[in-house]
Amino acid sequence: MKRREFLKAAAVAGGILTTGSSMANSWSATKPNILLLMADDMGYADPTCYGGEIKTPNLDALAERGLRFTQHYSTGRCWPSRGCVLTGYYAQQIRRDGMPGIKMGNRPEWAQLLPNLIKEQGYKSYHSGKWHIDGHPKQNGFDRAYGMCEKRLGKGCDDNRFFASKPWKEGKYSAPIKKGQEYYSTIAIADHAIACMKLHKEEHPDKPFFSYVAFYSPHFPLHALQKDIDPYRDKYTQGWDKTREERLERMKKLGLVNCGLSDLQPKVKPPWNLNPGQLKKIYGEGEAGNAVPWVTLTREQKKFQALKMAIHAAMITRMDTEIGRIIKHLKDMGEYENTFILFASDNGASAEQMNRGDKHHRDAPPGSARSFMCLGPGWSTCSNTPFRYHKHWNHEGGIASPLIAHWPKIIKAEGELRHDPSHFIDIVPTVMEVAGAECRDRPGLSLVPAFAKDGAVVHDHLWWYHAGHRAIRMGDWKLSAVKGGKWELYDLKTDRCEMNDLAEEKPEIVKKLDKRWKETAEGFRQRLKRG
């Protein structure tokens, strides 16, 4: 369905217009603002509207008036995901992640970022927060940008601290940090996004805007305002086992999943994690390096682990609060009803345990600027409920992401779920259709048809590769493999937790999916060779 036809049909269905209304053409031609909100390392089951106990009233409100996608996917890692989100290509297609035969590097010239793709439709574009893509935002179509680390341009972002940064400056809306004033990046990123909206209203009142707001939360280190930590201090003393069980029960009632709870994986953790001796030396007796049953932890470990999850929850609640401020400003501007909002997380929760940035000081209050703690495998498993594995892997725990779509003027199926499997490669085609631009030569599909009904978006296949891990999904069948491991076959219709490997029982399906995985990978290599 063409954009104009879809908008008109949606308006009629929603009772806003009647068939044949003289307003239909003019209204459908009105271009909406677009707000893309990204969390960093937030698990599928963390927000309340996806079954979590973490307070996220603003995300919940978006879900209640919009749509929740239950089978949306990332790439499993931050930089490839962001490459997908802003180009519409798989990361390997554009050298934003490596694989055999493809070396990671800068994007080809033809892999333009989203702001350049919708510029002809009159959009002004603004970036606030994490970057982690090659090039500079302002050299890739963004009119204003804040939050990236200039010294590490193209090689990552300053995601090692939340309480220390240079003041952001954006014309008359600059916000220098005064002496004694507490800086927190999640707040500063929202400040900048709001400032850009104010400037846009003054300078371009007749143009639509695209705002890409990429929070660092809840990526490590576990840094949060003490006032945000306090409500959660006793919340997680029951441990990750009980919390996982409670989350799964809520998720089933919400209709998000229909599988059982995956087993803990005590031996699974990123290979670069600190070893047990290092963890003890840096953090003391309370740290735990593996996702073991909660009952096996010492009293000191339980206390320390519960506090870590409290800080993680505080970071997400603060992010939600700042999203609420951005939404309030949209309402104050009179732009809320005609702003298309998407919210997602760049990958699953992280099991990483490192000590970098400003390093950890044992005498510092947990969550403060002088502390440096990571969530770790135990609570990461909980955040990724009910799935296995974590960020970095291509099993469901690493790649499943919440996706909320909200657009009051168009989406009338309030609070409904969409079970269409989708991927970050679909974001660009979706935004381009909403903006009235034509999308060509990209592997993703527009999610616009899903606004009207479930099951309207059907991919031939979805493909993954990262750091030796790999996967492919065709229909409800999925092949998953860890680095150096053999293919595992799962029927996601009944086993999205990937607990019942059917590879030996159904070798013909393994062969079919493996062939498609290899063909897709070879297609990426050949396209890059052509330039």
Image: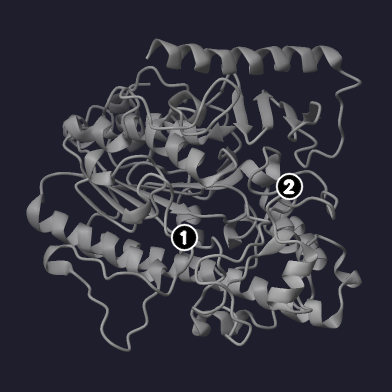
Q: Judging from the image, what secondary structure is the residue with disc 2 in? A: loop
The kind of residue tagged 2 is Tyr
Horizontally, is 246 left or right of 93 in the view? right
Instruction: Name the secondary structure under disc 1.
Output: loop
Mark sitting on residue 251: none
Classify residue 79 as left or right of residue 267: left
Which residue is at the front of the view, 332 or 160?
Answer: 160
* Residue 306 visible in image: no
Residue 202's image quarter? Answer: bottom left
Residue at the spot x=87%, y=35% of the render? 500
List x then y, in percent, for residue 196.
21, 58
- Spatial CA distance of label 2 from label 1 is 22 Å
Image color mode: one colour
Q: Position of residue 105 (x, y in %)?
A: 43, 32
Q: Which mark is residue 389?
A: 2
391 and 122: which is toward the camera = 391
514 horizontally vs 414: left or right: right
Q: Earlier in the sequence, mark 2 or mark 1?
A: 1
The x and y percentages for residue 327 are: 34, 61
- Relative side of 40 to 269, left or right: left
Return the mark for residue 159: 1
Residue 231 location (% of width, % of height): 59, 82
Would you say residue 110 is visible in this rendering? yes
| Quarter of the rendering occupied by the N terminus | top left
Which residue sits at x=65%, y=67%?
53
Location of residue 69 with respect to 161 vertically, above or below: above
Q: Nearer the viewer, mark 2 or mark 1?
A: 1
Graded by Cα atoms within 10 Å as few (under 14), some (14 to 19) or many (20 or more), the crowding at tag 1 reads: some
